[in-house]
Image: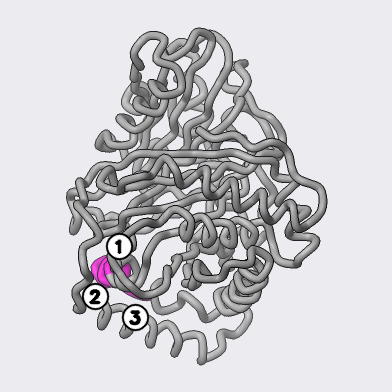
Amino acid sequence: MAGAPGVSVPFDNGFLAYGAAHPGTQMAIGVAALCAGDVPSRAELGLLLEAAASACPELAGPGGGAVFRPGRHLFESRAPEGSGTAGLYAALDAVANEPLPGVMWGVWLVHGHAPGEFAVVLRGHHAHFDGLLIAQLCELVVGARPAAVRPAPTAPPRPRPGAVVRDVAAVLRGLRDTARPVAAAGTTEGRVRQVCAATGLEGMRRVAAVHGGTVNDVHLAALAGALAAWETGPRWHGDPRPVRAKVPLGLRRPGTAERLGTRISAGWLTLPCDTADPVERLRRVAADSGRLRARLTDPGTGALMRALSPRMRRLVLDADNHPRRTSLVATHVPGPARPLSVAGRDVTGIVPLMFLASGQRLSVCLATYAGTAYFSVTADTGVTGLDRLPGCWLAEIGRLATVSGRPGRTPRQG
């Protein structure tokens, strides 16, 4: 069907140029919705895809005026019969390593691992998709209201010159760091795998309320402790310096109030992995992230990047994601607050699928859905011992909950 009038979605040609410069890098981000019920037909899923394209005409093709053909975006992956959770995650890993279709996004139906269970995986090129857009699409295609987004200001505040100066200085530092070699931490195989854990969101909110900060601060503090407990031998990121997390922050710009998704700016936090006390870790993270948010929300921040050509933005992305500058990316995606369904089948959980930049070995995401917080890790298959990391994170969340009063809901892994 033709794309009906709808709302716009962002697009960043810089990520297209980045992908072209790194042909071995998987440029997709996405989410797997884990569902209960009989496996839906292709026709049922096709109707959901048409709803998404109607809401966001650009998903039908460049310019938003193309005729939408659901079959070009719909794929199927069958896990070994009765293979259970292990088979599901193996199938999700296989999907995450598949090239994106020429139409830049698609939906994969994964089934066979358990009776009455299936997964629907939405993946798209990072030039087109960000975490917020994926969360909003998940709500739109089932007829729910999209998550509230603060409208962009109608008139931009006057940028402070200092923000632009900081942008220029950051680009120059990044280009300098790119030229410096980094010791290898192990073999990089060029394929990715996923591990995931879940815990109660309310418990994380209680910790944040007791000690100050946000749910994401609680997550990052737990991540710092988890990495310290998980690491053995040489640092997994190949750099003896402290772990530096690149933290994307969604920004609403003037003139974009009616658009889905967001535009991303990012800053860096040094994770206090060497701090033993979990409360002190949280305090350090909360203080640093507060300063970072204040800096990134300056209207001048990101002005340089927006003014650059796609080729120049690609060079900046190269510098930003260089292992000497970024140990890992740590994303936070607030998702739907209420339970959703896919073609009438309940969505019982999610697995975020992250973009892993060239040269990176690990990317993490905290996503929330229906009162549950999901800690998801996308890693190069050359990273050893990955299955232990979610358990380390859950243990650190438990430590924070214990020192904050009542323990939270029983967590689960995988």
Marks 2 & 1, CB-CB < 8 Å contact? no
Q: Mark 2 or mark 1, which is nearer to you? A: 1
Q: Which kind of residue does numbered mark 1 sit on?
A: Pro
The stretch of residues the image draws in magenta is: 307-318
According to the image, label 1 marks what residue? 234
Disc 3/disc 1 C-alpha distance (Å): 29 Å
Q: Position of residue 328 (x, y in %)?
A: 40, 60
Which three-letter amino acid code belongs to the residue tagged 2?
Thr
* Number of numbered discs visible in the structure rendering: 3
In the visual, does 345 lie left or right of 15?
Answer: right
Is the residue 24 above or below the residue 360 in the image? above
Q: Nearer the viewer, residue 403 or 408?
A: 403
Instruction: Using the rendered view, name the quadrant where residue 76 is placed.
Output: top left
The amino acid pointed to by label 3 is: Val
User: In what quadrant of the picture does the N terminus appear?
Assistant: top left
- Where residue 5 appears, as percent x and y from the top left, is 54, 39
Q: Residue at x 52, y 48 (%)?
A: 392
111 relative position to 18: left or right: right
Task: Find residue 216 and report its image quarter.
Answer: bottom right
Query: Residue at the location (36% across, 75% down)?
Result: 241
Q: Which mark is residue 178?
A: 2
Q: Element under label 1?
A: loop
Label 3 to label 2: alpha-carbon separation: 11 Å
Tell me residue 267's x, y (percent): 48, 72
Q: Nearer the viewer, residue 399 or 339?
A: 399
* 195 sits to left or right of 153: left
Residue 171: image tag: 3
Task: Judge whether residue 12 can be spotted in this image.
Answer: yes
The mark that comes first in sequence, 3 or 2, is 3
For marks 3 and 1 on the same chain, the one whose residue lies earlier in the sequence: 3
Q: In percent of the image, x 63 and y 62: which residue is there?
A: 217
